Amino acid sequence: MDITRRQFIPLAATTAAALFGLAGCGNDASTGAGSAADAGSAEPSSDGELTLLEDGKLTFATSPDYPPFENLEDGEYVGLDMDLGRAIAEYLGLECVYTNIDFDGIIPAIVAGGQADAGLSGISITPEREDQIDFSDPYYVDNQAVAVMSTNTEITEDNAAEILNTPEVTIAVQSGSTGADFAAENFPNAEQLPFPLFTDAFAAVSAGQADAVCGNSAVVQQMLNGAYTDQHVVMTSATGEEYAIAVSKDNPELLDKINEAIAALTEDGTIDELIAANMG
């Protein structure tokens, strides 16, 4: 795979607009605040009945440990995906609800049914996942990145591709993520250390349990700008992964409505505004 130093690429050109309030979205423990009344001028179509876990509610499964896409701050769901879910629900005239599921359990939960209507959690489209569920139209494009401790002088930008692929190196990843797939494909000789939460993968590097962490570029950079300033990126790869919403293959009507909402929110500039507000 061609290794480059390109940065993440939004699916649509971002704008400098500030984030406006969006409709509340929560689970039994917390509910967001605000209104999406200004999220766009488009009106949803009213034809057809949707099959939902709860009437009048659109329930998304998410793993809120993946800023700037999803995170919990003071009991409130924040991030690009969380704002997008609120905007989609508002467009469809539904209440938005989030339920917390470890990332590697989201797609199995959508397949099994009974826990959520859709998965919204920085989920990249892959052929393996498409065998199990349907994906909405994409709303964001990201790449892969690898970070190490800033004090690590053995793994550098110049030798990362070689050194990371040795038995002496341990790479922390999130279970079931494309970061885990990328590491397995590009560094097959390294030991992989999986964690249910991506934040735990970064903590493992800081604690000396792992030499490097691999994951989506936008999230890696957000982590380095926040709690893990003691780490830095030594490699990025332009994988061009498309983020989309996961929906059961048994619920094509919901998929159609979500795609309708994404198209409308793209057309009226809402998604550009959400990207600009969350990726700053």
Image (spheres, helix red, strand yellow):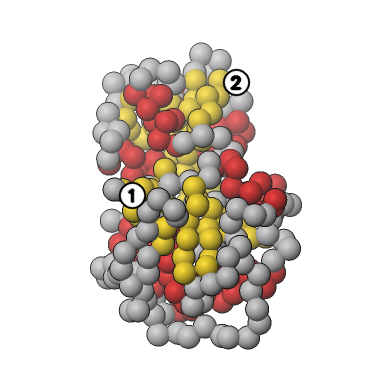
Q: Label 2: how many residues lie within 10 Å, few (<14), some (14-19) or many (20+)?
A: some
Marked residue nearer the N-terminal end (2 or 1) = 1
Residue in the image at 34% along x and 53% along y = 76
Q: Could you say where residue 279 lies in the image, as x and y percent from the top left?
A: 33, 56
Amino acid type of the residue tagged 2 in the rendering: Asn
Residue at (42%, 18%) from the top-left corner?
209
Image quarter (top left, top right, bottom left or bottom right) of the N terminus: top right
Q: Indicate the secondary structure of the residue bearing disc 2.
A: loop
Q: Is residue 227 visible?
A: yes
Instruction: Give the number of the disc on residue 75.
Output: 1
Q: Is residue 224 above or below residue 204?
A: below
Q: Residues within 10 Å of mark 1 (few under 14, many from 20)?
A: few
Left or right of 57, for residue 7: left
Q: Nearer the viewer, mark 2 or mark 1?
A: 1
Q: Is residue 146 left or right of residue 280?
A: right
Q: Is residue 264 above or below residue 171?
A: below
Q: Which residue is mark 2?
A: 189
In the image: residue 37, left or right of residue 185 = left
Residue kind at label 1, given as amino acid type? Gly
Q: Residue at x 33, y 58 (%)?
A: 278
Residues at marks 2 and 1 touching, judged by CB atoms closer than 8 Å: no
User: Which is more toward the observer, 272 or 59?
Assistant: 59
Q: Is residue 182 visible?
A: no
- Residue 202 position, x and y percent, is 39, 31
Could you tell me which quadrant the C terminus lies in? Answer: bottom left
Q: The residue tagged with tag 1: helix, strand or loop?
A: loop
Give x and y (percent) for residue 122.
49, 51
Residue displayed at 39% across by 24% down: 205
Image: 152 above or below 61: above
